Image (cartoon, rainbow, N blue to C red):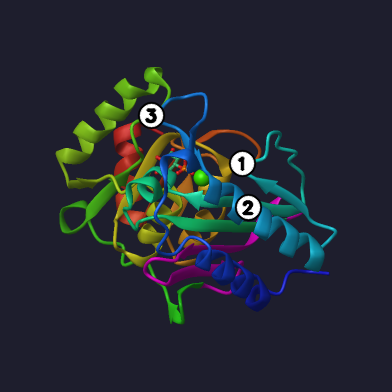
Amino acid sequence: MSVDIKQLKSIIRKAGELIRNVRLSPEQINSKDNRLDFVTKFDVEVQNFLESRFLENWPDYLFIGEEQEEHKFGQKGFIVDPIDGTTNFILGIPHHCISVAVMEEGKIVQGVVYCPALDEMYWAAAGEGAYLNAERLQNPDLPFNETVCGIGSSPYNAGLREPTVNMISEIMKRSDIRCLGSSALDVCYVASGRQGGYFEYEISPWDIAAGMLIAREAGATVTTIDGKEPPLDRNLTILAAGPGIYSEFQEILGF
Ligand code: IPD
Ligand code: CA
């Protein structure tokens, strides 16, 4: 049975209640391999909640969640980040979200990104447009000097620091920088025009799978940093922007 987006949104809204107004205690926070990469009790709780509701309603879909020990990718399933912006969540910064993409035949067909603190739900269905709550979204295609450009958080991989700094320096010649700390929301902010563009040199599929569809349905362009279709089964680079800024990025990056 295919996924009913109304029902999907309602389950995700309920999951949002699990993390609204939470105050974490130190024993609820754990570090992953990298000391700046955290997981909390709530990442796991939200993931478990979504997994059980999704599989009970749509048992023929795979469930791929960030906090699983092993990721089994396929052609048909849910790609889930239970909390994107975990560091913000830990610090009490309300800019974090739940991100859910629905994949069929290897393509994202529905995407929902929900920020519980602001009760903002970005969502899209392929060919049917993108929305923020009930409002239809259209990327305003602003030039660099009339907007800001988002960048990912400091890369965990030290080898990516230099290319990241080089890109920041190119952008600073043309625009203002923002580093908001949730790539799912970064891509949605490109959809709505809160940011003109966003790039990051290494992210995971669950960080952007839903936002990618939302931004594209709003008329923005989303590719890897060398202009290719983003893969959904491994780490990747990402570049999202309105058409005008995207072509300037092409000049900067030479593809
Ligand atoms: C992180 C955030 C951050 C991005 C990192 C991601 P997480 O996701 O989206 O903005 O720069 O690359 O790993 O760890 O909070 O789910
Ligand atoms: Ca996460």
Residue 216 pos. (x, y %): 49, 60
Q: Which mark is residue 47?
A: 2
Which residues fall within the magenta stretch?
A: 104-129
Q: Is residue 123 above or below residue 229?
A: below
Residue 1 pos. (x, y %): 83, 69
Mark pair 2, 1: CA separation: 7 Å
Which type of secondary structure does the marked residue at label 3 adopt?
loop
Near-viewer residue (201 or 35): 35
Q: Amino acid at mark 2?
A: Gln
Number of marks present in the image shown: 3
Q: Which mark is residue 155?
A: 3
Which type of secondary structure does the marked residue at label 2 adopt?
helix
Nearer the camera: disc 3 or disc 1: 1
Q: Which residue is mark 1?
A: 67
Reading the chain from its start, which is encountered first: label 2 or label 3? 2
Residue 24 pos. (x, y %): 42, 49
